[in-house]
Amino acid sequence: MLEFFTNWLDNSSLSLKQLSAKLTIILSLISCKKVSDVKALDLSNRMFTSQGVLFNIVQRTKTKLSSVEYPSFPINPKLCVVLCLQEYEKCTGAFRTSPAQLLISFVKPHPPVSSATLARWVKWVMGLAGIDVSFWAHSAGGAMASKAYWSGARLEDILKTADWSSDSPFFKNFLLQTDYKCG
């Protein structure tokens, strides 16, 4: 996925549909989060920092997240979540009535989107990238965690990033059952 995004246009040249889907995927992949966790991101609880962007989560989620931080990636602007988020906020600011749910529909009247919509966006872009979309879109986070593990990332870092308190869900539900390629 990340390689696919490096070949896309700059954020400012993407359609709102493309930008919305790209932001959703980058937020999911970087944090190894499900789309339901990404759906909980709220602009009124977002803070840009010198290292990236921090979201405090006030909405109840299945994973009981209290916050999630996304690092800046200035080396490659096409993969930088902060730059993608800033462009998204600029593009959607004109039709937001209040700063609430981050991800909104690209179709008028631009209501907040559901987790199912976010999953469709993820599957749409993954299909464009030539990735097998026969698995559920929420598996992207597990796939990214598996990719990190097989690339030599420390298990402790993967568990912390994904907010897993133990390694058993990772080994039981993701790593051992992952037979598709990720990014």
Image (cartoon, grey):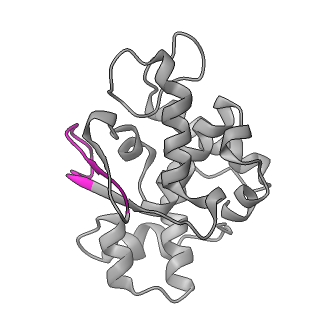
| Image quadrant where residue 163 sits | bottom left
Q: Nearer the viewer, residue 170 or 19?
A: 19
**Up-down relation of residue 161 to residue 120 (above or below):** below
**Along the horizontal axis of the image, is 169 left or right of 173?**
left
**Along the horizontal axis of the image, is 183 left or right of 138?**
right
Q: Which of 73 and 104 is in front in this view?
A: 73
Q: Which residue is drawn at 44% across and 28% down?
A: 114
Q: Position of residue 160 (x, y in %)?
A: 30, 72
Tell me, yes or no, if residue 139 can be seen here. no
Q: Residue at x 62, y 52 (%)?
A: 135
| Image quadrant occupied by the N terminus | bottom right
**Up-down relation of residue 15 to residue 86 (above or below):** above
**Up-down relation of residue 37 to residue 102 (above or below):** below
| Image quadrant where residue 108 sits | top right
- Which range is magenta? 52-67
Q: Residue at x 35, y 63 (%)?
A: 50
Q: Where is residue 142 in the image (x, y as percent from the top left)?
A: 48, 64
